[in-house]
Amino acid sequence: MNPKSGTTTPAQKNKITILVGKQANAKLFFTEYSGHATEIAQQAVKEGITKIIAVGGDGTVNEVARGLVGSETALGIVPIGSGNGLARHLKIPLKIDKAIQFALSSNVSSIDVCFLNEIPFFCTAGVGFDAFVANEFAQQNSRGLKTYAKMSLKSFRTYKPESYHLESQQSVEIKNAFSITFANATQYGNNAMISPKSKIDDGLIEMVVLKPFPFGAAPIIGVRLFRGTLPNSRYIETASDTEFILKAEEDLLIHYDGEPLQLSTNVLKITLKPKALKVIGYV
């Protein structure tokens, strides 16, 4: 469990500690630094542990999951983050007690794992406005959808769309893209469905390009995002493939599963390993 994750109160985290303590053959570990969850997961694999359950947000889930890729150890999730994108896609209960029981008793499935260069992601990743907002959001003291919406509105006024060169089955120039998202799952989190047709076990990466749009169109795009009808917008272009290469003029600021990262390269290679992670959830 990440003790600093999301919007969960100390009382709720104490409840998790008590509930886990009542389970047979279960032990709770607290993460102490960035990357610690991956180390714990890797050790669990070496010891032949059958399930490791990430208690936290999408960042914690990503850290745990990257330590399990290619193994027989299954990932469970108790979602206590701000967005809980992968948990929502896998139809995991959002209530703590139900999520714990779900993780302990539900069936195991296999999902695809995507990579930005060598960085694994399990839900969504990309460049442009979303990465810009993720970077701003990460610096805020408060979390949650309200804070994210506030930062999005503030960032809209200052962000400038960029141009990219894309290589997949054919090479194209993408001029003035507002954002480019590479999706394994349907959503960012909070049921904001950027790629509602994505299937997490189909061996394909969906690319969603959001073209620049007037400020007056933002409310309509927002409604479409949460209703799962965004692909119907004239400002959206989509493509599916097993691999993409994206080039920009300058070093790229990216986001992966909600986490921002400034790269020291202007080239991204987006790849996929089919069904490389075992998860507890509905695929």
Image (tube, rainbow, N blue to C red):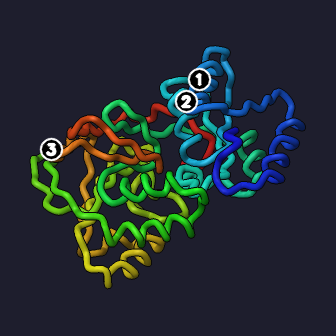
Tag shown at residue 117: none
The residue under the point 61% across, 60% down is 142
SS label for mark 2: loop
The residue under the point 54% across, 23% down is 71
The residue under the point 36% across, 56% down is 132
- Ranked by sequence position, the earlier of labels 3 and 2 is 2
Q: Is residue 146 left or right of residue 20?
A: left
Reading the image, the residue beneath label 3 is: 167
Q: Position of residue 174 (x, y in %)?
A: 14, 57
Reading the image, the residue beneath label 1 is: 39
Question: Amino acid type of disc 3?
Answer: Glu
Residue 265 against residue 282 in the figure, above or below: above
**Quadrant position of residue 219:** bottom left
Q: Is residue 175 left or right of residue 203?
A: left
Reading the image, the residue beneath label 2 is: 35
Q: Is residue 161 left or right of residue 193?
A: left
The residue under the point 69% across, 46% down is 78
Q: Residues within 10 Å of mark 3 (few under 14, many from 20)?
A: some
Q: Position of residue 134 (x, y in %)?
A: 44, 54
Q: Residues within 10 Å of mark 2 (few under 14, many from 20)?
A: some
Question: Amino acid type of disc 2?
Answer: Gly
Q: Residues within 10 Å of mark 1 (few under 14, many from 20)?
A: some
SS label for mark 1: helix
Tell me whether circle 2 and circle 1 mark residues in contact (CB < 8 Å).
yes
Q: Position of residue 79 (x, y in %)?
A: 65, 50
Classify the position of the N terminus by image quarter. Answer: top right
Foreground disc of the pair 2, 1: 2
